[in-house]
Image (spheres, helix red, strand yellow):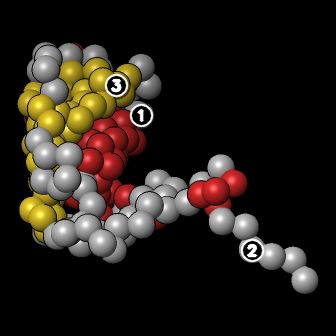
Amino acid sequence: MMGFTHFNESGRAHMVEVSEKDDTKRVAIARGIIKMKTETVNMIKEGLIKKGDVLSVAQVGGIMGSKKTSDLIPMCHNIFISGSDIRFNILDDAIEIESEVKTIGKTGVEMEALTAVSMAALTIYDMCKAIDKDMVIGDIRLIKKTGGKSGEYIRQE
């Protein structure tokens, strides 16, 4: 009969054990950008995209993405999200996206915040691709995180 191999001892992937950690309030903020033609931005602002209200749908897509992160990212814990918000800054040729995700738990919400930004950007791309296939999604990064053993992190930009 074959024995079981511990994944962590053999160098294989494993989910981090968090049951001994204390529950703490955790917050993560992430940002990204989707660059596009000025005409596309103007059509979004004027509500002329055929698929509907782009930023409202992208906000829902981002929030849904934050809630589904553990289904998308291997080894990411399924956690209770107590709050998730998506904000937009409309520029002449781009839309900046910011997510803020909150929980009280044993593990952080950095991946949830990053996934939220990614999903919001992908939703914008999907809704606008018929008129602008040159859009570019990028610069997705963690801005701030609080809580947990490692404490606070603030990106120095």
10 Å crowding of disc 3: few (<14), some (14-19), many (20+): some
Residue hosting label 1: 130
Q: Is residue 136 above or below residue 18?
A: above
Q: Earlier in the sequence, mark 3 or mark 2?
A: 2
Q: Position of residue 12 (x, y in %)?
A: 66, 53
- Foreground residue, 39 or 32? 32
Residue hosting label 3: 138
- Give the amino acid type for the residue marked by disc 2 in the picture: Phe
Disc 2 on helix, strand or loop? Answer: loop
Q: Earlier in the sequence, mark 1 or mark 3?
A: 1
Q: Is residue 24 above or below residue 115?
A: below
Residue hosting label 2: 4
Q: Residue at x 44, y 25 (%)?
A: 133
- Give the amino acid type for the residue marked by disc 1 in the picture: Ala
Is 63 on the left or on the right of 147, as rendered?
right
Disc 3 on helix, strand or loop? Answer: strand
Q: Is residue 146 visible?
A: yes
Q: Is residue 65 above or below residue 153?
A: below
Q: What's the CA distance linking mark 2 and mark 1?
A: 52 Å
Q: Is residue 124 visible?
A: no
Please tell me whether mark 2 or mark 1 is closer to you in this view.
2
3 and 2 marks in contact (CB < 8 Å): no
Q: Earlier in the sequence, mark 2 or mark 1?
A: 2
- Give the amino acid type for the residue marked by disc 3 in the picture: Gly
Q: Residue at x 72, y 67 (%)?
A: 5
Q: What's the CA distance linking mark 3 and mark 2?
A: 42 Å
Q: Position of residue 68 (x, y in %)?
A: 37, 63
Q: Position of residue 18 (x, y in %)?
A: 35, 67
Residue 91 lies in quadrant = top left
